[in-house]
Image (cartoon, rainbow, N blue to C red):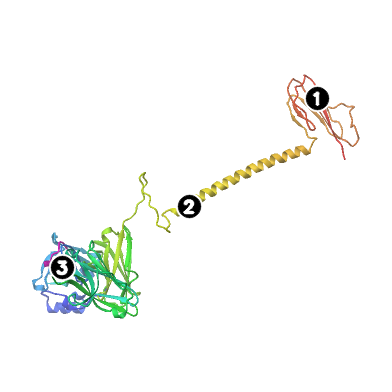
Amino acid sequence: MSVSTDLSSVTHRRMDPLMLLFLLIAGRTGADSVSKASDVSAWTGGSATLSCFYADRYKTHVKYWCKGLSWSSCTPIVSTDSPQEGKVSIRDYPDQRVFTVTINNLTAGDSDHYYCGVKINKHSESGTWIKLSVTDGVSTLDKVSVQRGGSVTIPCFYGDRYKSHVKYWCRGYDVRSCTPIVYTDSVQEDKVSVRDDPDQQVFTVTINNLTTGDSGSNSCGVKISGGSDAGASLYLSVAEGSPGLSVDKQEVTGVEGDSVTVQCRYTYDYGQRLWCKSVGSCAAVNSVSLDGRPVLIRDDRDNNVFSVTMRGLERKDTGWYWCDDRNQQIPVHITVSQRTTTTTSTDETIKLPAPGSTPTGANDKWQSLFLYVGLGSLVLLLIIIIITWKVWDKHKKKMVRSQDPGSTELTVNPDHEYAAVDRTGIIEGAPPDQASEEPGADVTYSSIVLSGPEQVSSRCSSHHPAVTPASDVVYSSVALKHRE
């Protein structure tokens, strides 16, 4: 972090000249010891948090906060080694080398110069001044740089008492003499439009198709009947090439509990990069929070970009912020939406998707459906194949039996005697004097000797019905196969 070397921002009390010379030679003066983020503006009745940065060697030193432009009359209000007041509190972050001061319930009387101080020893101390402005009027940025041909939205903030008043945008430095371009209660133009948001106490001005002729002083105004209008001015710079400070987009959205990151791109190094909140405080690279909310700022000087990450988003983080390089600003609006939760209950409400959009989880449901249909089809195909094979196997066996009339099926009993003679002759169990009826003929002989009155199912040749035989009866059959 670069720090200004302007010794006018540093006060050393009751310091011996030789000691001062030593510190100057050693580079240990307050110029590189304590620095501020920026001057701060805040609303009446609100609060402001101011950041003061210090060198690593002051981590263990006592820090304090006092009011007044002159060090001789600057009486400490609060310090890190004393109890905190209800209206003003101070907190030290040694690891980040920064201490913050928070002032609550602001009034117009709180507008003043304040001093961030570090006690070096009982004879010397170091610090820098911060200006706090408390207003209930109108405020905006100081200088905005944009590229020719593009567009920009500028926020104008106002106090609670101006919620119902007409707002306008005019060309010129002073609302008492500037030329109004558009009002909130008039027809909006294509090039310049203004929109009021009373709930957030801000009205925004959007300018399209920017040209170099749009460069110059402009003012945010609030019309006051029977009195002088309230307003604040800024300088709009339209560049031919890359603007001095820019962002990828001015509208950023996030979800509760998540984080958002904004890339702030700068052209020139003015020594410090800041992230500021509407009419509040700013956070620098070493800051850990902005108005009590966690923020992380990283500076990439090789690519001239510093990134701002806001973590653990809450709905109250919605609002206007801006990148600041201490020379110009570029506003960014962050919208934090509520996180949607899925509940399983009988009263569950089904939200239909917008036309042309894909409902949440629809792809998973279709994938599951395709998987079940595919598995069912595969099982069905397997069943069909098994049935077909069974039918074909049974038919094949039937065909074999029909083509072999000489086959014989017997249902036998192990207590019976069986004998068979093939066509080549007669084997044991057949009559000894029985020979082939015709030489060369295919003859098959079979005989069954039953020893008891049991049933036998026999199918010889082409048919034989089941019979109930008599006791000790011999049954024989002869099948002839004639050759062609």
- At mark 2, the secondary structure is helix
Tell me if mark 1 has few (under 14), some (14-19) or many (20+) residues whose alpha carbon lies within 10 angstroms of its own.
few
Range shown magenta: 103-112
Could one spot residue 59 in this view of the protein? no
Q: Does residue 149 sit above or below 340 in this rendering?
A: below
Q: Amino acid at mark 2?
A: Trp
- At mark 3, the secondary structure is strand
In the picture, the disc for residue 56 is none
- Taking the spot 32% from the left edge, 65% from the top edge, the residue there is 252
Q: Position of residue 113 (x, y in %)?
A: 14, 71
Mark 2 and mark 1: span between their CA atoms?
72 Å
- Taking the spot 46% from the left edge, 54% from the top edge, the residue there is 363
Q: Amino acid at mark 3?
A: Val
Residue at the spot of label 2 = 366
Q: Point out the image quarter for the C terminus.
A: top right
Q: Point out the image quarter for the N terminus.
A: bottom left
Furthest residue to the front? 187
Residue at the spot of label 3 = 134
Look at the numbered discs 2 and 3 and tell me whether their residues touch, using CB distance below 8 Å: no
Q: Is residue 350 magenta?
A: no
Taking depth in this image into account, of 275 and 199 the one nearest to the observer is 199
415 displayed left or right of 160: right
In the picture, the disc for residue 475 is 1
